[in-house]
Amino acid sequence: MSVANLCHRLQPQVSARTAAGFAEVLRRLGAPLQVAVAGRIKSGKSTLVNALIGRRVAPTDVGECTRLVTRFQYGTVDRVEVVFTDGRKQVLPFAADGAIPAELGVNIEEVSHIEAYLTNAVLQGMTVIDTPGLGSLDAASVSRTEELLGAAKHRKDDDEEGSDDLDDTSRNAVAGAEAVLYVVTQGVRADDQQALAAFTAATASREAGPVNAIAVLNKADTIAPESVSGADGDVWKAATMLAEKQAATLKPRVADVLPVIGLLAESAESGGFTSADAEALRQLSALDDDILETMLISADIFTSWECDVPSGTRLRLLEKLDLFGVRHAVEAIRKEPEITAGALRRSLLDASGLAAVRHRLNLVFAARADGIKAAAALASVTALAHASGDPGDRQRVHDAIEVLLAKPEAHQLRLLEALTLVASGAVDMPEDLSEEVLRVGSNADIGAQLGMPGSSRQELAPFALERAGWWRSFASFGATPAQSRVAHVVHRAYFLIWQQLR
């Protein structure tokens, strides 16, 4: 990789401390993409983390653990390590239910974060960082999140000038996540936008935007369909329409907003849904329509109504599926009376919307992980050079990056940079052209890049060539110097797409 070569080449030319930072950047380039899951408190972040990982390992009830940053990464042996602020580590056993203990049994004020290593296939390609809920945090939790994600601004300790260890500023410059999955519920508030801006700024990228951030509308089943005009009483349609409105509000900070039911996804994907649950749902499906409809009006009525299914069993179903999931499962059983527990679980998983979230994660993050990590690495390298206080280091790094970006193979980095310039408003473009830049730069699928999803190669190729010509003309005639810089990159993007389609 070109960025890795740049780090190797510069290491002998910079100070020992900066070189140590470059070594950490190189390690990160070879590691899985790091995705931080952020959101307001009680937005269901940890539940969604469990669903994505496919294992109920992140505690979802309020406890010490939920006030800490937890990194879930691949390991050959399952283990939990508490990392203290002084660098010490302490291995903890998992709780009886297989999750990280909600109470750690240590002085939480001395804890930096938690590292969870899991033998999990999903984590081979992506490290998931669960963060404390924003908006109602104690100051210590905010500080821990900022320090791990690189948002905290620290002064260098003059006493460490001769040390080869990284100072706090440098360590934070290379510690941040490379991408953000932001969790919202119901309405997007002004402080959600502020929190998302602060959180994406804390990631290890030059800027943050649709290339490395997506959002999900969690708890989609709690949306009242009558509150969304045009939803026709359909909960999922209402959630989808609300997510589209939220996407318009949060863009260009995120690539998309997708509806999801985290609780349903967690139960169906992490082994929480059992054959006993399926049997209980089968019993419920045998009830008269009027009785069942009455029971499904509210959680209180559902658990207190007199029927053959024990109240404790119904409470368990409610905790795993909520009323929406119970209704969906009963309808699936009535439609197909012989449905197996496994097929019912898959039906619940389909209803949760998790598949669409995973697909979008793959398109926005996984498919372009190398480019995102490379952009983050360049940002870290730049930050390290500035933190060194050595003008020579800064100039050498600046010159090397300019040479790198001028190379044809660095086009993906140039495209990410152009996307960021437009998304952040640093380069002012007409709205329709801004939308086109965001579309081309934010998608890995060619049809989506061209705004023609589902079209054939024969249809896409001439359109890509036509747009390449248009952007080349715009770059030469009518564009400002700043717009021209972006236009040349977009022209090349379209031209490369045309070549690929041929």
Image (cartoon, rainbow, N blue to C red):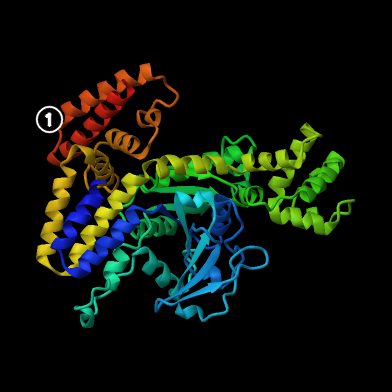
**Location of residue 108 with respect to 317 vertically, above or below:** below
- What kind of residue is marked 1? Ser
> Going by the image, does 305 lie left or right of 357?
right
Counting from the top left corner in percent of width and height, residue 462 is at 30, 18
Counting from the top left corner in percent of width and height, residue 406 is at 15, 42
- Residue at 25% in and 36% down: 430
- Pointer 1: residues within 10 angstroms few (<14), some, or many (20+)? few
Of residue 207 and residue 380, the one placed in the foreground of this image is 380
- Residue at 89% in and 54% down: 306
Counting from the top left corner in percent of width and height, residue 297 is at 75, 49
Please say whether residue 252 is visible from this viewpoint.
no
> Going by the image, does 119 lie left or right of 367?
right
Counting from the top left corner in percent of width and height, residue 299 is at 74, 55
> Going by the image, does 432 lie left or right of 85?
left
- Residue at 40% in and 31% down: 448
Q: Quadrant of residue 61?
A: bottom right
Q: Mark 1 highlights which residue?
A: 476
